[in-house]
Image (tube, helix red, strand yellow):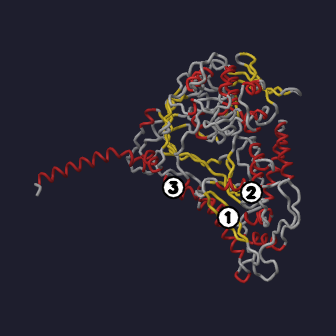
Amino acid sequence: MKSIKAIAQTTWILIIIVIVLIAALGGVVLYYSGVLTPGQQLQTPGFVNDNVIILEGGNQPQWLDPHVSYYQYDYEILQHSAEMLLWYNGESSTDIIPWLSDTWTPNFTTTSLTYTVTLRQGIEFQDGTPFNATAVWFSLNRLLIMDGTDGSGNHGSQAAWILQQLLNTDYSSSLDGDQAYDAAWVKKVLDQNFVQIIDNYTIKINIQLKTTQFPFLLSQPWAAIISPTEVVKREYTYHTDWGTFDGNLTKYFIKAAGVGDTYFNVPRQGWTFGTGPYYLDSYDPTTYKVVLKVNSNYWGGPDNFQYGKIGVPKIKEIDFNYIESFSTRLLDLSAGKATGIGVSSADIYSVVDRDTWLNNAEFKSLIAGVTVHGPFVQFVTDWITFVTNVTDASGKLRTFQPTADRRIRLAFACAVNLTEINIDVNNRLGQVPNQLIPPGLAPEGAYNPDITPPWSLDLPRAAELLVDAMEHPMTSFTYYNGTPIPAGKIDNRFGDTNGDGRADITYTIEIYVGAADILTQKILTTISTNLNAMAADVSRGGNATGLRFAVVPVPGGQQYTLASRHQIYAYWGGWVADYNHVIDWLGPMYLSSQTYFKWNQMNYTTLDNYVENAMAADEAGNLEDLLHWNDLANEYANYQVLYFYTTYPLAYFVRSSYLKGWYFNVALATEYFAPMHYETTP
């Protein structure tokens, strides 16, 4: 038996341990509690004193070369290091200002389309190389020469096409197929004279169409201006079979043509090739950690920036950390070890008060010293789309083509309350769309709030539409190429075909959706449940339509594969802006010759006409006509129910309240930390 003295000693040891643990974990308690008791104060996080931003999320870099990358997370890193001639003014998604350029002036004649661009003087790249006209010529031609090739060697898969559409598209693998990538091809690309050097700080940018898109194409990281000195040095070291650089940049282009495997994709030793406020100090491809450090020689940014001239940033370092576990991220945030973390919609109530958000649309943080910024509409639209000219696996046209009938598409769209599901399932982290185009998209006016869809929850109307389609089946129908389908090829009869109140012809319409997409599965399940109740015989309370709907979850985008083969009636999808301009939406989503209508086998001559007129107006630089035809296209698509739009997903950011001057630009889809700073009180 232990003595009383021994027990007392053990007790005191335990008390001391508890006191030490409380002291050590005090920060956790104070940070995690959303409400402080009287007298309690937050402990200033270490990152505030160190002037370091520590971000934790579930994303990994893909390709960190700005002329290779086509991935938003990469751009979040790149925009802090590499800068462009033009850039967005603070939080505005439509106001673009000169950045590395000083002025840009259009000079359009009947024989040439040119912008004269004067460059800012006195700027150096982080490696000490002067920023000048040669650097611009090198950088933008490097993008064209690499031709949208990713780090694995896939040509035309990356962002080069965005600028190539201003030029001769015959030289683009994305827009015109495989290229030769030999010296002759390089000469043809360079001979376009895209960037014409006038003097050390004046260039002309020569394009082949006027286009209202021009500033928006040059204001993203694919158009980054980078140091020719560092690029060539790193590339010839990385590509050991390239030999020795002899100072001829054209010879470098011949080596680099169509080569997406560059040192800068995985820059283990970092880079100093930008003019931006931070240089990339290191990248660990094992942990995916990226460290940016302040450029003490930063030129400071333009005077007319929305938040004032930036100067040398107060934040000295930005760490991008890949932390897969959300619970680990949450603990680090709560303990003051992370400035900000990634939080999925499923985890939102770990950081914000549920009732305040759902009732007042206000993010009230549950964690002391933490602010949740948002919500922000993104340039993303989710939708259900329909396929016509549906075939079986052998390619034979199916006899039954229900989704070619507008009445059935509209009945589908009238069978769900999207607002209710957005609140109950999506935690209100989406906005119910009124059209394809999301708010804020350029040019200003592209999103028209007055355009409304012809659907809303209306089950009696859905029933009437299905009964009408049943009693008066569609008989006139065309192939995708617009020619009439011969009689007898299509039979759209279904349900009660003889008037006895019983469904004698039954079909099941399957809608395909990603297996991980809980929100859309709930939307589709609700639609299916409501419409399936109408399929029953009249004696069982239905309308004897015999038309049933089934939700089919599939892994990893398999619905797109099936849709591209025209083998399914309907599927979930979404459009994410390649770049901030309405033309990037109208073509791919509405033209019969482009991506989705090709898959969907839809051919609407009227819609083609509207979109082609919008594109012609854009090429002519006629903004008024562009917006006119854009409105007509969206109104027509809504009326025909070519897509059933389900949500504009909302963005939000969970960040330390000590971080001041925070803002977000939807066009860039990310934060820009250079103008921000810490204060010692949240």
- Of 510 and 290, nearer the camera is 510
Q: Quadrant of the N terminus?
A: bottom left
Q: Residue at x 82, y 42 (%)?
A: 615
Q: Tell me which label, 2 or 3, sits earlier in the chain.
A: 3
Taking 516 as reference, is 543 above or below it?
below
> Which disc number belongs to residue 417?
1
Measured in 3D between alpha carbons, the distance from the residue under mark 2 to the one under mark 3, in whole angstroms, is: 40 Å
Q: Pointer 2: what residue?
A: 566
Check disc 3 and report its element: helix, strand or loop. Answer: helix
For mark 3, does the 10 Å Cα neighbourhood hold few (<14), some (14 to 19), or many (20 or more) residues?
Answer: some
- The amino acid type of the residue labelled 2 equals His
In this picture, residue 446 sits left or right of residue 485: left
Helix, strand or loop at mark 2? loop
Q: Quadrant of residue 24?
A: top left
* Foreground: disc 2 or disc 1: 2
The image quadrant that residue 154 belongs to is top right
Mark 2 / mark 1, whichever is N-terminal: 1
Residue 349's label in the rendered image is 3
What's the amino acid at mark 1? Asn
The answer to whether any part of residue 216 appears in the image is: no
Crowding near pointer 1: few (<14 within 10 Å), some, many (20+)? some
Vertical arrangement, residue 3 with respect to residue 162, above or below: below
Label 2 packing within 10 angstroms: few (<14), some (14-19), many (20+):
many
Front residue of this view, candidates 42 and 429 = 429
Q: Quadrant of residue 88?
A: top right
Q: Position of residue 339 (x, y in %)?
A: 48, 40
